[in-house]
Amino acid sequence: SGGHSPLLQALPFCLNYELTGDGLLAQSAFWIFEEAFKDASGKHLMIDRLCDVFLISVLRKVLEEGAIKTGMMAGLTHP
């Protein structure tokens, strides 16, 4: 549903990150695709959890970069 989510409303309209290297963002994206294209037990549960890790990694990156200047999410960066 997204449109009413305070989290999504706090984020910039568009985010663009390289998914290369060995950082958690790149690794979690890799693991999501690895899991998506195999036929294993618990596949959907694993993808759900990996998406959680990916989203948290994106949020950390957004906060580290200071991409959010006001609102609820910006308050999380205040010491």
Image (cartoon, helix red, strand yellow):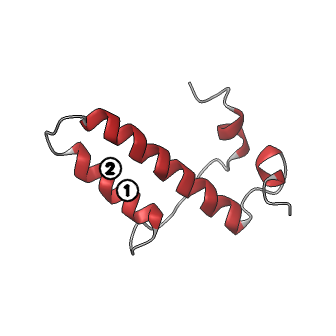
Provide residue 7's location: percent of width, then percent of height. Answer: 68, 39
Name which residue type carries label 2: Ile
Residue tagged 2: 32
Provide residue 56's location: percent of width, then percent of height. Answer: 56, 51
Name which residue type carries label 1: Ala
Residue 3: numbered disc: none
Q: Tell me if mark 2 has few (under 14), some (14-19) or many (20+) residues whose alpha carbon lies within 10 angstroms of its own.
A: some
- The residue lying at 62 percent from left, 59 percent from top is 60
Q: How far apart are marks 2 and 1 (CA)?
A: 5 Å
Front residue (pair 38, 65)? 38
Q: How many marks?
A: 2
Residue farthest front in this picture: 41
Q: Is mark 2 on a helix, strand or loop?
A: helix
Q: Please indicate whether residue 63 sits to the left or right of residue 1 in the image.
A: right
Front residue (pair 23, 70)? 23
Quadrant of the image containing the N terminus: top right
- The residue lying at 45 percent from left, 70 percent from top is 23
Question: With respect to residue 1, does 13 lie above or below?
Answer: below
Residue 58 shows in the view: yes
Residue 15 shows in the view: no
Front residue (pair 52, 58)? 52
Residue tagged 1: 29
Provide residue 6's location: percent of width, then percent of height. Answer: 72, 34
